[in-house]
Amino acid sequence: MTSWTKRALLLLVWTICFGLPASAAVRLNTASRSGAAKTRKISEYEALSPKRKGTYQDLNLLRRRAMRALGSRFQKMAVDGDFRNRYVLYRDQEVTAFLDRTDPANPHYVASAAIDWRLRRIPASRRAHVLVVPNQKREHIGKRFGVPIDSSDVAATLSVMKKAEAIAQRLGIENSAVYVNPLDRLSVGYLHVHITGWRTRPYPARLESPVE
């Protein structure tokens, strides 16, 4: 693997986890006569110019493909109703709620997973982290990445968030925060609303998947 390939892979991983940096080596689509790729750092103003736009579109396309691949897991659960390996707490015609892998009550809890400041201040024994997803496919606030967002998209997302607030009360989660991460912090290409807070009582038994 060449050094340029390693840098490109590192940049791709960075964009998946954190979004594109304001200033980055983006001259990925040109090569010198010797075949070696040329890279140089550019400002955010240059990055937004029409001459550079194609390079960033290519990187965004790769990032969206990676997020959609992960989003297919949520789609399988919410749309297809196959949640055999998930701890699903609640499901109705509109949404499905399940435990995130950073919730210690999840049988597939990952203690080493990164958590944000909201969860770091809560003892693991009391920590609650639930995800709520719509049962109709939606990649983020918009139905698909990169398309214009209209009032119906905002209303659909708000409906899921209102459901999440009601679920937080139903589960007895105190000091709950209900939120959607911005696009540059996403890694999963399926709309999911986070519920974090203090768990005051045991969760209900997990729902059985209708798909065998």
Image: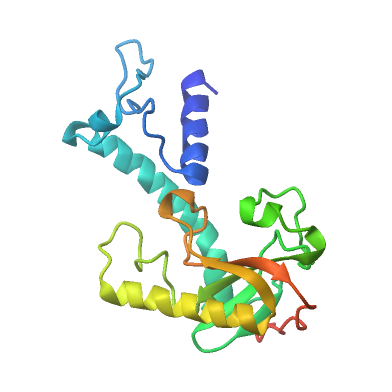
Where's residue 73, x and y in %? 57, 65
Name the residue nearer the viewer: 186 or 28.
186
Where's residue 64, x and y in %? 41, 52
Residue at 38% over, 28% down: 24
Where's residue 105, x and y in %? 78, 68
Name the residue nearer the viewer: 191 or 83.
191
- Among all residues in the image, which is located at the extreme bottom? 93
On the question of residue 113 being in view, the answer is yes
Q: Is 184 placed above or below 26 here?
A: below
Residue at 36% over, 47% down: 61
Q: Is 139 placed above or below 62 here?
A: below
- Among all residues in the image, which is located at the extreme top? 34
On the question of residue 80 being in view, the answer is no
Occupied quadrant, residue 125: bottom right
184 relative position to 118: left or right: left
Which quadrant of the rendered structure holds the C terminus?
bottom right
